[in-house]
Structure formats: structure tokens, C-alpha cells
Image: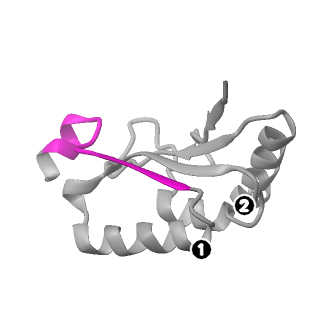
Amino acid sequence: MDFGVALQWGDMRHIGLSPTLHEVVKTARDLGFRSLWTTDQMSARSDNSFSTEPLITAASLMHIVPEMLLGVAVLVLPLRNAAVVAKQSSTLSLLSGERFILGIGVGGSETEASLA
């Protein structure tokens, strides 16, 4: 059985994001996790926390942990250009050696649904 880890961020204003993210994913790898998952958040959060753009985040991790699968656990597709997402996703898959997995959906909040 394989396990993955979701990369969800709280309030990132007081720490440097990139070194921390790289440390987290290397630790996940060292602990035996098989995959890393980012999430998409297109609307503002009530706690003012920060959410990274999931496709760029996956691309930035591609070479940090070359043995792990990289996935987006539900990209909010109605708020994006589908043709651009298809091109970005196929490029990520190609450049990562087919380690990229894309989940798509309509969003997880009423605000995101109302923006579509």
C-alpha cells in the first residue's frame, strides 16, 4: 500500500516558503511517502492564510524528489482556461517522467462556485 502527503499551508507570512516546502517534501520522501499532493484555492481564505498555485508548486518539486508522484487534488477548472490547463498538465507529465496526476473539480467553497 502506498501513502501520500497533502501539502496544505496555513499562515505563511512569517516564514520563508521555498526552503520550508523543500524541507517538508524531503522529509516526506525520507519517511516513505510515495506521493505529494497540492490543492487549489481560488478564493480568499477567512484566516488570511496563503495557498500556492498548484501547478507551479508541482513543477518546482519535480527535481527535488524525483522518485515521488506529484498530484493536484482537485484543480478548480471552471475558473481556468481548460486548454491552458491541458497544455500545462501534459507538459508537467512529460517533464516529470509521467509522475504528474491531475484531479479536476468545481471548487470547494460557495465563493469559488459563484465565481465560475
Q: Residue at x 59, y 52 (%)?
A: 70
Q: Earlier in the sequence, mark 1 or mark 2?
A: 2
59 inside magenta stretch: no
Span colored in magenta: 100-113
Q: Nearer the viewer, residue 68 or 7?
A: 68
- The answer to whether residue 7 is seen in the rendering is yes
Q: Which residue is mark 1?
A: 95
Residue at the extreme top of the image, as rendered: 1
Q: CA distance from mark 1 to mark 2?
A: 21 Å
Q: Nearer the viewer, residue 34 or 13?
A: 34
Amino acid type indicated by mark 2? Ser
Amino acid type indicated by mark 1? Leu
Q: Is residue 65 above or below residue 47?
A: below
Tell me where residue 50 appears, x and y as whole percent.
52, 49
Q: Which residue is mark 2?
A: 18
- What secondary structure is found at the residue carrying circle 2? helix
Dot 1 crowding, Cα within 10 Å, few <14, some 14–19, many 20+:
some
Tell me where residue 41 appears, x and y as whole percent.
38, 47
Residue at the extreme right of the image, as rendered: 30
Q: Residue at x 67, y 24 (%)?
A: 1
Q: Which mark is residue 13?
A: none
- The answer to whether residue 81 is seen in the rendering is no
Q: Is residue 50 above or below residue 87?
A: above
